[in-house]
Amino acid sequence: MSVVRSLARPLLGSSFVVAGLDRLRHADETAQQLSPLLGKAAQALPFQADEKLLARVVGGAQLGAGVLLTLGKLSRLSALVLTMTSTLSAVVEYRSADASTTEGRSHRRSQLLKNISLTGGVLLAAVDTNGRPGVAWRAEHLASAGKKVSQRQLKQADKAVRRAAHNVTGS
């Protein structure tokens, strides 16, 4: 892992670890804040789940994915989870922020920009292949190599058939 990745992942992941811990500690407040979205999610689930449980799940996912990103383990998957949680935070915090005063609107805007920036950071981490080729590149090059091998084998088979046909008709 490069020095930049060794520094950047813990820096990015730390804010999610702290936010996840905060969501878990204050599950009631989190459930209240996320209530409009969690209520719909709870209804869509095939099993009974309350908003407080879902708030804990979101907090736990944020904490776990933040720790994994910080450690550089399953970093692409954890970055995708963090992308979802930061997008959720951006929407919920923007909707629930006080916009009645100039200070409130300013704070609301800064929180939105912070959440959008964090989302961008974890999106970059989600597509970071750590200097190794990604799955799409590997699949493309595997298909290309397979095509070359099959074309070469087809040419060899064609030559062998022509040679055999010539030997049969030429003898």
Image (cartoon, rainbow, N blue to C red):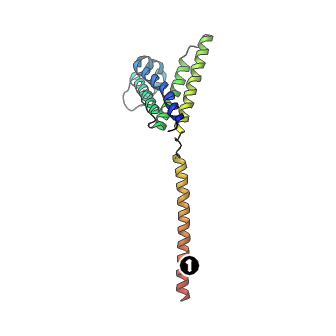
State the image coordinates of residue 66 (x, y, percent, origin top left): 46, 29
Position of 60 relative to 130 (above/below): above
* Frontmost residue, 17 versus 136: 17
* Frontmost residue, 22 versus 29: 22
State the image coordinates of residue 65 (x, y, percent, origin top left): 44, 31
Position of 73 relative to 147 (above/below): above
Quadrant of residue 58 within the rendered picture = top left
Q: Which residue is mark 1?
A: 162
Q: Kindly identify the residue that appears in the image at 59 percent across and 23 percent down.
A: 113
* Furthest-bottom residue in this view: 171
* Frontmost residue, 76 versus 45: 76
Classify 10 Å Cα crowding around label 1: few (below 14), some (14-19), many (20 and above): few
What amino acid is at disc 1? Arg
Q: Secondary structure at mark 1?
A: helix
State the image coordinates of residue 159 (x, y, percent, origin top left): 55, 75
* Furthest-top residue in this view: 101
- Horizontal placement of 19 versus 144: left or right? left
